[in-house]
Image: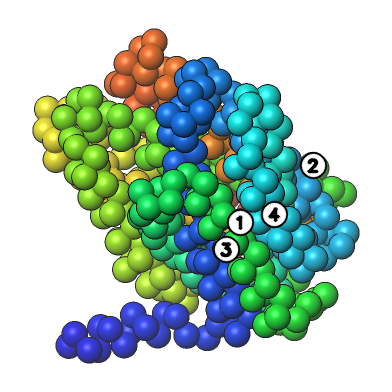
Amino acid sequence: MLQKGFERYINNFRGFSREVWILTTITFINRAGTMVLPFLSKYLKENLHFSYAQVGWIMVAFGLGSMLGSFLGGKLSDKMGFYRIMIFSLFTSGLLFFVLQYITTFWGLCVGMFAIMTVADMFRPAMFVSLGTYAKPENRARAFTLVRLAINLGFAAGPALGGLIIMNIGYQGLFWVDGATCIIAITVFALMVKEKKKSPYLDKQHPGAVFADSVFKDRVFWAFLFVSFATAMTFFQIFSTLPLYHHEKYGLTELQTGLLMTLNGLLIFLLEMPIVSYFERKQVDKIKLILWGSMMMGASFFALLWDAWAGILVVNILFITFGEMFIFPFSNSFALSRAPKGHEGRYMALFTMSFSLAHIGSSKIGMEIIDHEGYQVNWIVMGTLGVLAVLCCLYLQKLLRRERS
């Protein structure tokens, strides 16, 4: 029985092209090597002795660079092809990480972080477009899920390795390892994957028949971007306000908060691919799945309003985790399937920019609300964002029905 279940789980990982597996591997190497980011605010505060306000401004420069990089990466992928953008982005950001360790002034770091994130985040939309080329249309949501698993596993391994490097070599070691992993990852990619201008797989279901003059006139896509932004705003609370709430309200230690985060990562690792495979086989409407995920994301924060029992934190994480599994793989897939041929980069750029904007807004807005109004008001705001995302999904379904008729 156990062996049969294991075989069924492994079957969810079959059917991908060699290129998709290589992309997944280099994504894991790159994300496991992204060790500077989890320790960045600590490094700026404790080693360079910046004030909280200065650290905040450097993180804003980080977020703005991420947004510009996402936009440029998508636009240039359409003009020059994703392959060159991916190689340029990772190789150059690897070199920039080597340089960044020698910048210690406030304005220098604002410019440095903006520059490095502009170059580094050109990679994301280009990589999404590459999946559209190297993955079969029927496997695309699963291919996105596979890459997400690699990102999650990389993020799980990275901080632990980063902590060991800081203890043994110091913060300088992080910059060297981070830069080196970027360069190693993209060298492996360049050696093992050849450039393909067009996908060898004909997408019969979505042949690029979205006749919008430009992405800015595609009303369906903009409604979808709002859903992506709203759900990402709520999800990113997991990295900012929730760990503080765990400690301040319930007295949880870093280890206990870490175990809750591990529960999130473990469930995604075990369940996301089977869930995505099941709904892909059944050909369930992607917007319907995103709607269900938005409901769960909103419910996760409304649940926190009942604060008489610490176990509600587990309920909160479970709702967030299942919401994440229903939203993110199918959002990636919908965004790419919506793009007309030759415009994939532009569409994926705006899609990734919605996440960058949510990343900047989530911690800043969440912290401001907590500072002035308290945690309960923040949970109401985040839960309401989930409700707005659900309503927008219903509007999206109406627009899509009208478009098809």
Q: Please, what secondary structure does the residue beneath circle 3 have?
A: helix
Left of 93 or right of it: where is 282?
Answer: left
Residue with the most extreme front position: 169
Above or below 207: residue 356: above
Above or below 202: residue 385: above
Q: Residues at badges 1 and 3 in contact (C-beta under 8 Å)?
A: yes
Left of 206 or right of it: where is 318?
Answer: left
Spatial CA span between label 4 and label 1: 6 Å
Residue, disc 2:
216
Above or below 208: residue 379: above
Tell me the colour scheme of the image.
rainbow
| Viewport quadrant of the N terminus | bottom left
Spatial CA span between label 4 and label 2: 35 Å
Spatial CA span between label 3 and label 2: 36 Å
Crowding near the residue tagged with mark 2, few <14, some 14–19, many ≥20 C-alpha atoms within 10 Å: few
Q: Please, what secondary structure does the residue beneath circle 4 have?
A: helix
Residue, disc 4:
95
Please tell me in which quadrant of the rendered image residue 248 appears.
top left
Q: Residue at x 77, y 68 (%)?
A: 83
Residue, disc 3:
181
